[in-house]
Image (cartoon, rainbow, N blue to C red):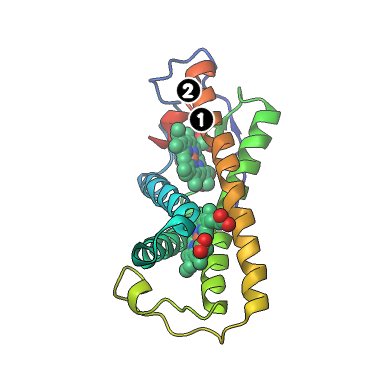
Amino acid sequence: MDQPQTAPTGGPAMSAAEPIRGQDSMHPDGQYSRLAKVFHWTTVPLLFLAIATGLTIRFMKDDAKMGFYALHESAGLLILFLSLARLTWRGFATPPLLPDHIPPTMRFAANLVHHLLYAALIIQPLLGFFTTNAYGFPLQGETAFLGFIDFPKFMNGNETLATILHWMHSLVGWSLPFLLAAHIGGAIHHHALRRDGTLMRML
Ligand code: HEM
Ligand code: HEM
């Protein structure tokens, strides 16, 4: 993942409604590509769905539980496939340069959070997938991917492995709301306080 570098345009005084302009020849309006935006905003509801269902599955009565698993696992795997496609696309359409009025610490923090988010978007569904398989519940029948695509059985049940993977899946799952709070808080800070047009790069 290349770090967006600086570009000598814009300033904190710029109106929040105005996109940052003149970044470089590939991004004349300083915006992420249309497809990058589609990937970003499609992932948002899926991720909230995956987190909400993940945290609430345990409280569901048995008759509703399978539906929740199906929803959770399908949303999670969709996130995985979307994120793999998104990162591939990012290799071709690099992000717009960050304007040079963004201080180095802020630039560093934003990039760190972006890297951690990308890592979580890939690792978390894989952990979930291997957890269910290790518990002996491949995505078949009631929990088929998207309700109708049966995945082959990946491994034999292994209780110890399942417990470790489940623990790791919980750890990443509980870290995600904090990462997202930092990311969304950062976006709101740029938009509402610094008014530097950063949010418009992704809209
Ligand atoms: C980005 C995608 C995903 C996110 C954000 C996510 C998030 C979560 C969260 C927050 C929990 C609750 C953890 C806890 O309270 O201990 C959970 C549980 C779980 N997840 Fe995921 N998950 C994702 C993908 C998947 C996938 C793809 C699968 C399987 C194919 C999966 C299978 C499970 C299972 C089996 C549980 C345990 C549920 C229970 O019985 O309490 N997850 N997930
Ligand atoms: C909830 C799930 C979200 C995830 C997983 C997520 C993830 C990401 C990632 C990985 C990037 C880096 C893109 C790249 O450089 O390739 C990014 C950029 C961005 N996100 Fe999000 N995001 C989420 C929600 C939001 C929300 C709700 C907002 C707005 C309030 C937002 C605003 C932005 C903005 C403005 C950028 C561009 C930052 C820049 O110009 O460098 N994101 N997001």
Mark 2 Cβ inside 8 Å of ligand 2: yes
Q: Nearer the viewer, residue 16 or 101?
A: 16
Foreground of the two, 42 or 66: 66
The residue sitting at the left extreme is 148
Residue closest to the far top? 13
Q: Residue 158: horizontal and vertical position, in percent?
A: 62, 82
Quadrant of the rendered image containing residue 201 = top left
| Three-letter residue code for mark 1 | Ala
Report x, y in % for residue 129. Answer: 51, 70
User: Which quadrant of the figure contains the C terminus?
Assistant: top left
Report crowding for label 1: few under 14, some 14 to 19, many 20 or more residues within 10 A (C-alpha): some
Q: Is mark 1 within 8 Å of ligand 2?
A: yes
Outermost residue toward the right in this view: 105
* Residue named by callout 1: 187
Q: Residue at x 56, y 60 (%)?
A: 124
> Residue 191 shows which numbered tag?
2
Q: Is residue 167 left or right of residue 121?
A: right
Q: Nearer the viewer, residue 158 or 90?
A: 158
Q: Residues within 10 Å of mark 2 (few under 14, many from 20)?
A: some
In the rendered structure, are the residues bearing label 2 and label 1 in contact, judged by CB atoms less than 8 Å apart? yes
The number of discs equals 2
Camera-side residue: 41 or 53?
Answer: 53
Q: Residue at x 32, y 68 (%)?
A: 146
Q: What element does badge 2 sit on?
A: helix
Instruction: Please tell me whether residue 191 is drawn above or below residue 73 in the rendered image.
Output: above
Residue 74 visible in the picture: yes
Residue plotted at (37% across, 68% down) = 66
What's under tag 2, amino acid-wise? His
Secondary structure of residue under mark 1: helix
Residue at the front extreme, as displayed: 61
Residue 30 is at least partly visible in this image: no
Q: Residues under labels 2 and 1: Cα distance?
A: 6 Å
